[in-house]
Image (cartoon, coloured by chain):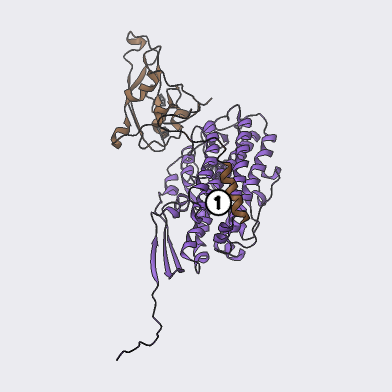
Chain colours: A brown, B purple
């Protein structure tokens, strides 16, 4: 009997504490800076083009092979009358979020700081009705960064 | 004229009951076929393999950095401990000396992970014995608290991929020490809560004492490790018997049980949580600023040919990595020695002769993670 009363006192004591739960869809927990949702590409605002040069480094390093990268000559390069210093630039880029295991390797291998993990709630709430919709193309991958909401954190 | 049938012995037939694969009490996808006579279990056949993803074979195609992420997925309740075995195996092959700071941080994270894993056990086990909801939500509250800290450091709540051969992927946050202390203070209260909720509860005792007994000799024969073995009275703790990281420099006790029943396994785990808190507190005082990666770290992770078996004490027991390398940047063969797999083998011995309702409790007391059993 004593033991049961002791159990009851524990249950009773939690009555006094503040609730730790949140009403999820209405209120969101604040995400830490390092939060890793899915990888997104970063947009170079001054050059009006992505940082990504299409170098394939991330594609080769990805453990689950969920990235597809195609590179092209930059039409905006200095040599052809543009003002960008990137000779090559990304043409097409797909990441299959359905396969990505959010391991951060692509961010670590990129030499151009062109990719980072999405640390906003938009990166977590990606549910769709069809798995095929999880394959993100270049405009979708850049959208977060172009909207200015993303505060990328790249490990020092 | 009425005839009275003579009293006769009816022949009874054992009944086969399928428990699982989709059963809330099996902690994952696991199937037990129970042969019952009335309410008494006569035989148990366990079927595993529903979660088999070929992780060991897959690891042969992964280089050493890619493989870390897969280790998380073998042990989804003690990811840091799983990563630790893997990276330490690579370090041993490559003969890398890990900087002090990284070792202390690894230790803190592994012990925190042990805490969160044991909290999960206390909650889930409570559900098994019939403390529906209450204990589970309390335990989850504590576990979430720890996961929040992990998220701040590594960026992910479950699949951290944070340890690297040589050290850590990146520095911890600036307020790391203060945050760990904060989390510990909450966890201490949490341990007290879980302990107060169940340990002395008469109903809980009635459900757990004296069932699922396994003797020390049997436990050793089955290859059990971790709390299951220690509950039977064998003080084997790899942190003590073959210290890795900095475990030789901290003080802690290895709790052992007396009877080897389900109740002892509970007591051992509760005490282990207190010891983990003690270890972390000591680590925090010894943590010094410094580099987290060795000075001369090769850019490419390539091991010389060789083979190594490295084991560490994960919350569920000995988590070992046997790695064969023929040179190059990926293992030629990787074998994961899973603690749960060995612990689960003893299930039959423990369960035969008990009631059906106790079978669930016994299974729960082994604290299995099916992903680790099947890899
Ligand atoms: S994201 Fe980085 S690593 Fe990947 S293709 Fe672009 S520049 Fe190369
Ligand atoms: S986070 Fe990992 S799995 Fe996802 S795209 Fe990058 S490298 Fe591939």
State whether residue B19 is above or below residue A141.
Answer: below
**Which quadrant holds residue A133?**
top left
Relative to B105, A72 lies left or right = left
State whether residue A32 is above or below residue B314.
Answer: above
Residue at 64% across, 48% down: B239
State whether residue B188 is above or below residue A84.
Answer: below
- Which residue is identified by label 1? B316
Where residue B59 appears, as percent x and y from the top left, is 45, 45
Foreground residue among B204 and B347: B204
Residue furthest to the front: B1
Foreground residue among A151 and A112: A151
Label 1: element kind = loop
Please state the chain letter of the residue tagged with numbered disc 1 in the rendered image.
B
Where residue B5 appears, as percent x and y from the top left, is 35, 87
Q: Can the viewer see residue B239?
A: yes
Where residue B23 appears, as percent x and y from the top left, is 40, 54
Relative to B300, A118 lies left or right = left
Query: From the Cβ of disc 1, is ligand 2 less than 8 Å away?
Result: no
**Which quadrant holds residue B85?**
top right
Where residue B229 appears, as percent x and y from the top left, is 60, 58
Residue at 50% across, 32% down: B155
Relative to B96, A23 lies left or right = left
State whether residue B284 is above or below residue B344.
Answer: above
């Amino acid at each position: 009997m004593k033991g049961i009363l002791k159990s009851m006192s524990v249950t009773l004591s939690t009555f006094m504490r503040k609730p730790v739960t949140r009403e999820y869809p209405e209120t969101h927990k604040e995400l830490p800076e390092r939060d890793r949702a899915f990888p997104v590409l970063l947009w170079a605002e001054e050059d009006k083009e992505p940082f990504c040069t299409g170098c394939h480094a991330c594609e080769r390093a990805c453990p689950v092979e969920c990235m597809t990268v195609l590179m092209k000559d930059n039409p905006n390069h200095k040599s052809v009358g543009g003002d960008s210093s990137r000779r090559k630039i990304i043409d097409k880029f797909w990441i299959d979020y359905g396969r990505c295991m959010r391991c951060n390797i692509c961010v670590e291998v990129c030499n151009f700081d062109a990719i980072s993990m999405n640390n906003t709630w938009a990166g977590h709430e990606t549910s769709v009705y069809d798995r095929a919709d999880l394959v993100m193309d270049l405009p979708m991958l850049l959208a977060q960064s172009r909207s200015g909401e993303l505060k990328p954190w790249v490990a020092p | 004229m009425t005839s009275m049938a003579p009293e006769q012995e009816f022949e009874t037939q054992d009944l086969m009951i399928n428990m699982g694969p989709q059963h809330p009490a099996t902690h994952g996808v696991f199937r037990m076929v129970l042969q019952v006579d009335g309410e008494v279990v006569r035989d148990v056949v366990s079927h595993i393999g529903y979660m088999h993803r070929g992780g060991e074979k897959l690891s042969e195609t992964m280089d050493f950095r890619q493989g870390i992420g897969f280790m998380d997925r073998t042990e989804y309740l003690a990811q840091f401990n799983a990563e630790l075995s893997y990276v330490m195996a690579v370090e041993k092959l490559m003969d890398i000396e890990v900087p002090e700071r990284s070792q202390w941080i690894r230790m803190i994270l592994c012990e925190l992970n042990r805490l969160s894993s044991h909290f999960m056990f206390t909650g889930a086990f409570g559900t098994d014995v019939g403390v529906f909801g209450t204990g589970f939500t309390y335990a989850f509250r504590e576990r979430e608290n720890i996961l929040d800290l992990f998220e701040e450091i590594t960026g992910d709540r479950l699949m951290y991929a944070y340890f690297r051969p040589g050290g850590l992927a990146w520095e911890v946050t600036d307020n790391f020490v203060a945050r760990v202390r904060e989390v510990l203070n909450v966890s201490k209260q949490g341990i007290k809560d879980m302990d107060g909720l169940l340990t002395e509860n008469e109903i809980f005792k009635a459900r757990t004492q004296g069932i699922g007994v396994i003797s020390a000799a049997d436990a050793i024969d089955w290859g059990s490790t971790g709390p299951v073995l220690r509950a039977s009275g064998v003080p084997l703790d790899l942190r003590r018997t073959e210290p890795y990281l900095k475990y030789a420099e901290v003080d802690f006790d290895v709790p052992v049980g007396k009877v080897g029943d389900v109740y002892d396994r509970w007591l051992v785990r509760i005490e282990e949580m207190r010891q983990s808190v003690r270890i972390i507190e000591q680590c925090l005082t010894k943590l010094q600023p410094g580099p987290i990666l060795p000075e001369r770290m090769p850019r490419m992770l390539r091991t010389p040919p060789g083979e190594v078996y490295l084991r560490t004490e994960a919350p569920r027991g000995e988590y070992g990595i046997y790695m064969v390398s023929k040179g190059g940047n990926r293992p030629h063969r990787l074998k994961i020695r899973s603690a749960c797999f060995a612990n689960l083998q003893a299930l039959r011995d423990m369960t035969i002769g008990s009631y059906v309702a106790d079978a669930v409790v016994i299974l729960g007391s082994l604290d299995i993670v099916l992903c680790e059993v099947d890899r």
